[in-house]
Image (spheres, helix red, strand yellow):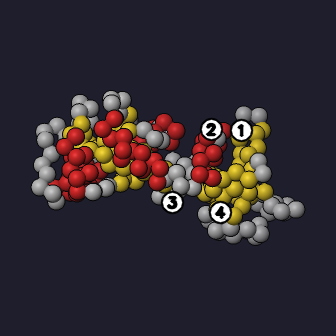
Amino acid sequence: MKLSDYSFRDLYKQCLILKSEWVYDGAIKMLSEYAYTAPPGMDAALCFCYLDTDAGMSFYFLSLAGFESGEIDIASYELQTAEKLSLRFRYGTDIEVKVYTKDITCYANRIEMVDTHYHRDESVLPTRNITAIDHLRNDAYPDDIKVLLRKDELQIEQVWVKLTGIEDGNLAGVLLNEPHSDFGVNMSDIVHVQVIQRGSDVYAVCLFPK
């Protein structure tokens, strides 16, 4: 299955085996600079999935892997730690993925390092727990959601908002694109968003000062 077949919730904070030509080539390029040769059967990368508020869904490279076998080349991980290397991949719809279910104890320190670093802005974390808006999220940037702008005598517009937290019971975020009509808000403005349910449908609507 491809990354696009999963929601961010299925992958977030999981160790994954990713298979893509550009993912594997990127890992090999980094490792080969240190006289490293991949053993037979390695064609993928074991990565830890995290969310970068700016770069979206991202994958921290841990070691080479065999996609079908699930075998891991721990030597590639040990080389990284010894040389203080790091490599990250961003979301790509062409990437095949499997959740890695074996023991990850040996990677615990690196995983904790990445997880801690990308939890610096704790205000955004509660917004990731709101499952009702998952259908409004951008696949590659799960903190970005589709929001409706509604105002008297203006045609409804849909915009993107990057969530930053929850304030007074409503979502808060940064408007990512410029509206076509004059709603009184502009790209880069902080806006507040109300989640509204009508029957089985759930919408996110921008709130305007009264």
Q: Circle 3 — which element? A: loop
**Mark 1, residues whose alpha carbon is within 10 Å: few (<14), some, or many (≥20)?**
few
Q: Earlier in the sequence, mark 3 or mark 2?
A: 3
* Mark 3–mark 4 CB contact (< 8 Å): no
Specify whether 183 is left or right of 23: right
Image quarter (top left, top right, bottom left or bottom right) of the N terminus = top left
Q: Circle 1 — which element? A: strand
In the current view of this chain or complex, which residue is farthest to the right? 210
Estimate the x, y position of residue 179 in percent, counting from the top left: 68, 66
Front tag of 1 and 2:
2
Amino acid type at image mark 2: Thr
What residue lies at 16% left-to-right and 59% top-to-bottom?
Answer: 33
Q: Circle 4 — which element? A: strand
Q: Which residue is mark 3?
A: 54
Mark carried by residue 47: none
Estimate the x, y position of residue 23 in percent, counting from the top left: 29, 50
* Mark 1–mark 3 CB contact (< 8 Å): no
What residue lies at 74% left-to-right and 57% top-to-bottom?
Answer: 192
Q: Which residue is mark 1?
A: 201
CA distance separating discs 3 and 2: 21 Å
Q: Quadrant of residue 200?
A: top right
Estimate the x, y position of residue 82 in percent, counting from the top left: 22, 53
Amino acid type at image mark 1: Asp
Mark carried by residue 175: 4
CA distance separating discs 1 and 4: 23 Å
Q: Earlier in the sequence, mark 3 or mark 4?
A: 3
